[in-house]
Amino acid sequence: MPPEQTQQPLLSEEQEETAYDSSEKVVVVGIDDHDGDVEAPPFSWRKLWLFTGPGFLMSIAFLDPGNLEGDLQSGAIAGYSLLWLLMWATAMGLIIQLLSARLGVATGRHLAELCREEYPTWARIVLWLMTEIALIGADIQEVIGSAIAIRILSNGVVPLWAGVVITAFDCFIFLFLENYGVRKLEAFFAVLIGVMALSFAWMFGEAKPNGVDVLVGILVPKLSSRTIQQAVGVVGCIIMPHNVYLHSALVQSRQVDPSKKGRVQEALNYYSIESTIALIVSFVINIFVTTVFAKGFYGTEIANSIGLVNAGQYLQEKYGGGLFPILYIWGIGLLAAGQSSTITGTYAGQFIMGGFLNLRLKKWIRALITRSFAIIPTIIVALIFDTSEESLDVLNEWLNVLQSVQIPFALIPLLCLVSKEQIMGSFRIGPVLKIISWLVAALVIVINGYLLLEFFSSEVNGAVFATVVCVLTAAYVAFVLYLISRAITYTPWQSLTRSKTATTES
């Protein structure tokens, strides 16, 4: 029998799920002769270009249809007064995403894989289910956003459910591009981000918001009781649970040897630069959308009734047609946002499922399973709620609540893992960054808790429903406290299991 066949069963590492196969990774090492074992090699523009990509894919979650709806409602109701909060919320999102990238680069594994190893089976399954629910909720919003855009661009010929079916086929675009390599996929997303930037910049030019007012809104904090709801929404929709998992996997698309401290630090430096640039771009695009609706609808009677469904029509009535009607410019930008975010959702779903369950399936099977999880409920939703704008707004509120509930299940494991020397080695976060990160996480969790309290206080009616909500809330709080306690009294679960097994065998 050949030696390869006898050794094959011993290669357990090859049987575990990984974010990228070695053949799929972009080769960065070798551009210069610096060893990189101890300290990071000198800065190189060429290397920055080769590391550019994962941050822009991550930034798409800051530009999905749910965020765009939050932007337009913030602008219509609060005017320019919350632009400063949008800036600081983006900065908080950047901190979380850089921690996610740090985890992926320093360990060579992504968040879902590490959760599989570091939590007992029951907790791991709960985390996986919660993350999948959050992903499905986000995907429904993104697919509905694409379907609305398709309906706009088809002059209403294509109904919402048909737009959902058309959007479902984006997973085949994803599979087609992925076969040609990571860089081709990243280039496709760069084009979509460029389409969004051009579309919403065109709208900004059409609306001509006052530059001084925009600058004051960004630099001068201002908050009133009338805009508190929009302020909470601006912060609450920035952190997407599945995006935290996604970024820790995307950074592994480059070949970085975790055993070489200098190479790891180099990768972290470049990823920090490109992620910052990517979120600056997303911040500018969000500014375009917010200010267009602030200029056109702030202080009007219809300000409180504007949503993703009717925004295009209101824009057309306000700014008119012209050579390129603003309705279709909005539709093109919305379609780019919806398509890019649904494809990244498919990407995230593969990493999440594979990481938590250690499933090593063919890519098309994983993409089909992941897509089905979102598309089937979305088609049902489209058929049920495609009756009025009000019903879709109610649906969007429930989906926002669904994602708000899941945020601790991404942030707490992330902060737990990046703080531990057993996991991160010398790249664990220091005391100052640890305090800042936990404060950011606590702020985001509290703000989303406020959203939940406001929502349920107005929606919960009847003793039976109230009892069910109370029981679920108690279980939810208990699990969150368990995750926090694991961050304080930390013992790697698999290490503990192995040590017990070794003791029993001896």
Image (cartoon, rainbow, N blue to C red):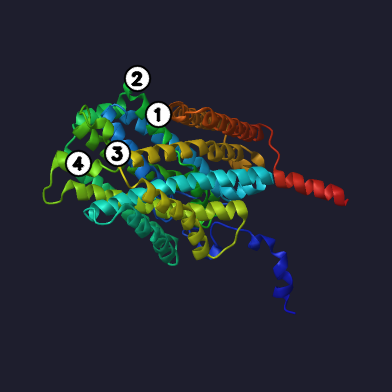
Reading the image, the residue beneath label 3 is: 307
Q: Earlier in the sequence, mark 1 or mark 4?
A: 1
Q: Nearer the viewer, mark 2 or mark 3?
A: 3
**Residue found farthest to the top:** 225
Reading the image, the residue beneath label 4 is: 315
Reading the image, the residue beneath label 2 is: 225
Neighbor class of circle 2 (other Cα within 10 Å; few <14, some 14-19, many 20+) is: few
Amino acid residing under circle 4 = Leu
Q: Earlier in the sequence, mark 2 or mark 1?
A: 2
Amino acid residing under circle 3 = Gly
Is 101 on the left-hand or right-hand side of 219? Answer: right
- Labels 1 & 4 near each other (Cβ < 8 A): no
Amino acid residing under circle 2 = Ser
Is 136 on the left-hand or right-hand side of 471? Answer: left
Residue 168: x and y, percent? Answer: 40, 58
Distance Cα–Cα, label 1 vs label 4: 25 Å
Residue 135: x and y, percent? Answer: 48, 47
Q: Which mark is residue 86?
A: none
Q: Nearer the viewer, residue 223 or 390?
A: 390
Reading the image, the residue beneath label 1 is: 232
Q: Earlier in the sequence, mark 4 or mark 2?
A: 2
Amino acid residing under circle 1 = Val
Neighbor class of circle 3 (other Cα within 10 Å; few <14, some 14-19, many 20+) is: many
Q: Is residue 265 visible?
A: no
Q: Nearer the viewer, residue 79 or 154?
A: 154
Is 123 on the left-hand or right-hand side of 221? Answer: right
Q: Earlier in the sequence, mark 1 or mark 3?
A: 1
Q: Residue at x 36, y 55 (%)?
A: 164
